[in-house]
Image (cartoon, rainbow, N blue to C red):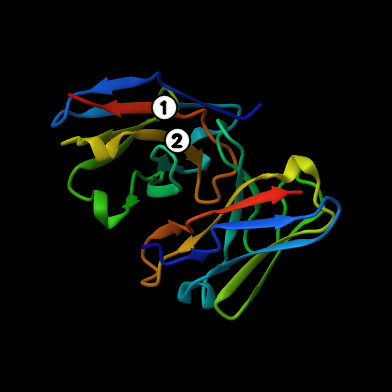
């Protein structure tokens, strides 16, 4: 079955970076892009960006530009997102989802930023 | 503030029909999709491209759009439909994608 499996929870210090992985299975990885979404505690969903797994081009929300990078490794069908210069406001669950329609979701990765 | 506006909370009696709305200028030009999220779970796509249901989504869920408003209608709401619902589309510039603030649906 189609599945997205994300890496485990992370605890980070302010000012550091975090890299979350999202491994796809059950479909041809390069046929569908990957979207990243986050959800702060008790808050709504926030769209972060999308990456084409075929061509590598990206589209990201303006608020993250400059400290947010999305990449893919087609040899392992894995997408990655890296967020740098972390602050406590980046404490959230980070989700990957399949393509623009987000029809399949990963289980989420909790990232906690605390000194 | 979000460029897609949703009512924070809506309630519906069991078995009745409820409409959850999403307002935004971008909806005049772009389709909305809708996601259901239950506590502790990842979101679930229930409607895409305005009025299409993914496989496995009950037909009591439907979508529509008029002017700057997209709507998700649940006809004959069930207890299992109690959840947060988010609309999703492009922002007013059309360059990026955004979510609405979400609507908490309570089934009475």
Q: Subunit of mark 2? A: A
Name the chain under label 1: A
Q: What element carries label 2?
A: strand
Q: Residue at x 53, y 78 (%)?
A: B28
Task: Tell me: B59 left or right of A75.
Answer: right
Evaluate whether label 2 is on the same chain as label 1: yes
Q: Quadrant of the C terminus of chain A?
A: top left
Residue A109, numbered circle: 1
**Number of numbered callouts drawn:** 2
Q: Which of the marked residues, 2 or 1, is nearer the chain's N terminus?
A: 2
Q: Which mark is residue A61?
A: none
Within 10 Å of disc 1 (Cα), the crowding (few <14, some 14-19, many 20+) is: many
Residue A95's disc is 2
The x and y percentages for residue B59 are: 82, 52
Q: Residue at x 32, y 52 (%)?
A: A60
Q: Quadrant of residue A54?
A: top left
Q: Which residue lies furthest to the bottom in this view?
A: B67
Pick the front one: A101 or A43: A43
């Amino acid at each position: 079955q189609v599945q997205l499996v994300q890496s485990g929870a992370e605890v980070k210090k302010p000012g550091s970076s975090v890299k979350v992985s999202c491994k796809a299975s059950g479909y041809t990885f390069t046929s569908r892009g990957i979207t990243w979404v986050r959800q702060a505690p008790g808050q709504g969903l926030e769209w972060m960006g999308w990456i084409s797994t075929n061509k590598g081009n990206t589209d990201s929300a303006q608020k993250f530009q400059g400290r947010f990078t999305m990449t893919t490794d087609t040899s392992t069908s894995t997408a990655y997102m890296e967020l740098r210069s972390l602050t406590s406001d980046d404490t959230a669950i980070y989700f990957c989802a399949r393509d623009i329609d987000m029809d399949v979701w990963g289980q989420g990765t909790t990232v906690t930023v605390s000194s | 503030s979000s460029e897609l506006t949703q009512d924070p909370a809506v309630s519906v009696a069991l078995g009745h029909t409820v409409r959850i709305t999403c307002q935004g200028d971008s909806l005049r030009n772009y389709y909305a999709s809708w996601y259901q999220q239950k506590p502790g779970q990842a979101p679930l796509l229930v409607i895409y491209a305005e009025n299409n249901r993914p496989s496995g989504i009950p037909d009591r869920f439907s979508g529509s759009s008029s002017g700057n408003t997209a709507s998700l209608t649940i006809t004959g709401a069930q207890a299992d439909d109690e959840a947060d619902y988010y609309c999703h589309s492009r922002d007013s510039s059309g360059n990026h994608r955004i979510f609405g603030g979400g609507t908490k649906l309570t089934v009475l």
